[in-house]
Image: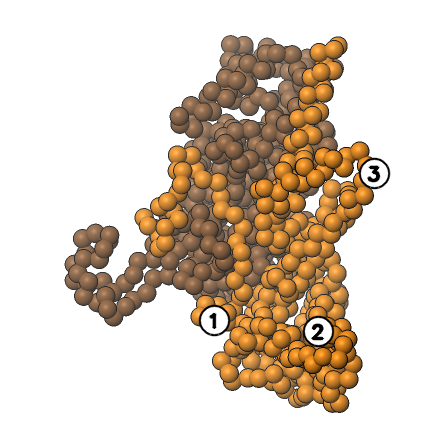
Chain colours: A orange, B brown
Amino acid sequence: MKKLAITALILAASGGVLFAVSAAEKSGAPAQEPAAQAQQAAPSEGKPAESAAPQEVVCFESRKGASEVTQREISPGWPNVKCSPTTGAALWYGDPFDGTVPMGKMPGLENIPEGHALVKPRSQKLAILPMCATACHNGVGPQFTPPTLPKDKKPTPIPTMEGLLPELKEFQHGRGRIWCLDCHHTTQRNKLVDNFGDPIDFDQSQLLCGKCHGDKLRDWRDGIHGKRIGEWASDGKKRWFLCTECHNPHNVQQGERNRGFAQLQPEPPPQTPKGMQGMKHELVHPVAH
Amino acid sequence: MTVTEDMNSQAGAERQDTQVPRQPAPADPSRVALKTSRRDFLKSGGMLSLSSLMGTAALMTESDDAQAAIEWAEHFQKNYRLMTPEEKAEARARLERRYSEEYGKKVTVDTTEAQPGVLMGYALNIRKCIGCRRCVHACVAENNQSRGRNRPGEKIEWIQVLRMERGKFEAEKMNHGYPEGLGIQVGGNAYTPVGQVLEGQYHYTPDLVPEKDATYMPIACMQCEKPPCVKVCPVRTTYREPDGVVVIDYNWCIGCRMCMGACPYWARRLNVTNPVLPKEEMNPVTHYLGNRPRMRGVVEKCHWCLQRTRHGRYPACVEACPVGARKFGNLLDPNSEVSLILARKNVFRLKAELNTFPKFFYFYD
Ligand code: SF4
Ligand code: SF4
């Protein structure tokens, strides 16, 4: 009986250690951090768990900074999304329709039942959009004090468009053949603009992009170009990713790489096969055979 | 030590611990898989005649030790294709009970059959893939592959992303008589070789992808219409389902690896060690022919997420791909994404000359 109890204790202890390690790994901490966390956690064990406030896990979807999703449990042990511990990218969807709304009017979608074409509205998430037409481009000029400005009377530089959107320095869209007001509405800066001069909502960016990229718009509408999640049947319920969820319209080409999608950090490589330590021949560029 | 020797020595160790009395469930998640492999069991039972074995099985199923009864029942269950609906339901209930206990959560084992009128197809835009490997890791999260990292063969990934150089023709190289490293050709070669053999880099580790001069080509099971892996399987445990997906009944796999040798796409993986599947990372929504936890010594491969696709959802890799390079749909539906791609785009299949007729199509704009 005693023996059994001891075995159980050892099992429990090793189980605990295992769990701690795997939990630390899951949180995406670099290799040294689990140890540091353990050290921090150890002295506070006796105290009430004040540091145990659950941290919000937010992962980005297609490209960093474009659309994000906050991790939550849909049902016990079933998260709405799983995030990569190395890069923070969304890797797995338990709920593909999290935070979506029906897509607005879009020509060519007449055959898709109401509510089957979903998009994730992004306009509320765009950091400076609410200020664009109220603070600066309201036809009057800047009147209110953005919270970033200091309160004292010393002269301070006002952030320019470039300061607010650093990627504008790389602005290459159309290689200089288009400029701001080809896409942004002249008087309603919270809107985009179509060829008739009518405003387009920021959550319907495909209507703007399709002005020039008609072939891509057709492919996107038919599900060939662009990303969709949800149901695979051609009449299934799907969430459509909008153009700007994948492409950065202000920096489409990323310099000389010129492939339309932002570079990002890759996930880790596969396990090294047995007997192939170092994998030098694999890692040499260019490909060695 | 070769992999086989490694396996045998483990098998020896396993056989020993089948002789000691049953212990409480081990805490190490790597040990939760089935303790004896089917092959070990058949080996050790080789002395007995089959009829007496069956008798013992009947006895065991009625014994008080539920776990042992489940294992015995599993060893004696039929090939999945030959099971009656009642036997399938029984096997399903048995597995659900065992997995739920092992992983400490409610695990469901789905047995949904193929829908009539569906032939699943896959398309991948080779120009769009940026080599980020999110599909690979989404697949692991969805399909309960082994996650170990310490021992060789412990970490299993079904999708491989191959990095290839982009080749080009250059004027300066017009008169290069004997192209370096390319053999016996004489008379000029203005061409820079690309990864023309599918032996490129799987272990590339740049800071950022896509790299400027690289092309990426993910490969996994192509769900061939004429699958050589099915042809060579001596126990007929791998077969083509009516909706076109090639599946494996893990309980009948003897781990002989004939299919791994036959598959021209390196799509199949063997569980050399006991799969390492931590409880909290285990995906509890499983399919009998799909992502249910595997045991040591069986072959597994991509099955287009049957547990999702049979219920209408996209495979996990499609949903994870950040650039939307991956497309999935019904080849028999002219409005599906894959059908439209086949109608409209430039499409090729990998190693088409082998007449395996993959239902996985690569395309480009
Ligand atoms: S790709 Fe390989 S494993 Fe898949 S069906 Fe074809 S031969 Fe079989
Ligand atoms: S997730 Fe998409 S882009 Fe990334 S490697 Fe896979 S197929 Fe390529």
Q: Residue tagged by mark 1?
A: A255
Q: Residue tagged by mark 2?
A: A128
Residue at the location (29% across, 67% down)? B169
Q: Secondary structure at mark 3?
A: loop
Residue count near mark 2 (Cα–Cα under 10 Å), binned few <14, some 14–19, many ≥20: few
Residues at marks 2 and 3 on the same chain:
yes
Q: Nearer the viewer, residue A249 or A242?
A: A249
Residues at marks 1 and 3 on the same chain:
yes
Residue A107 in the figure: left or right of residue A47: left
Q: Chain of mark 1?
A: A
Closer to the eye: label 1 or 3: 3
Question: Would residue A34 be visible to someone looking at this image?
Answer: yes
Residues at marks 1 and 2 on the same chain:
yes
Q: Residue tagged by mark 3?
A: A48
Q: Nearer the viewer, residue A194 or B302?
A: A194
Residue at the location (43% across, 63% down)? B212
Q: Is residue B84 above or below residue A169?
A: above
In three-dimensional space, the C-alpha distance between marks 1 and 3, rounded to whole angstroms, equals 53 Å
Which sits earlier in the primary sequence, circle 1 or circle 3? Answer: 3
Place of residue B258 in the rendered image (x, y in percent of width and height, measured from the top left) = 43, 33
Residue count near mark 1 (Cα–Cα under 10 Å), binned few <14, some 14–19, many ≥20: few
Q: Is residue A125 above or below residue B232?
A: below
In three-dimensional space, the C-alpha distance between marks 1 and 2, rounded to whole angstroms, equals 25 Å
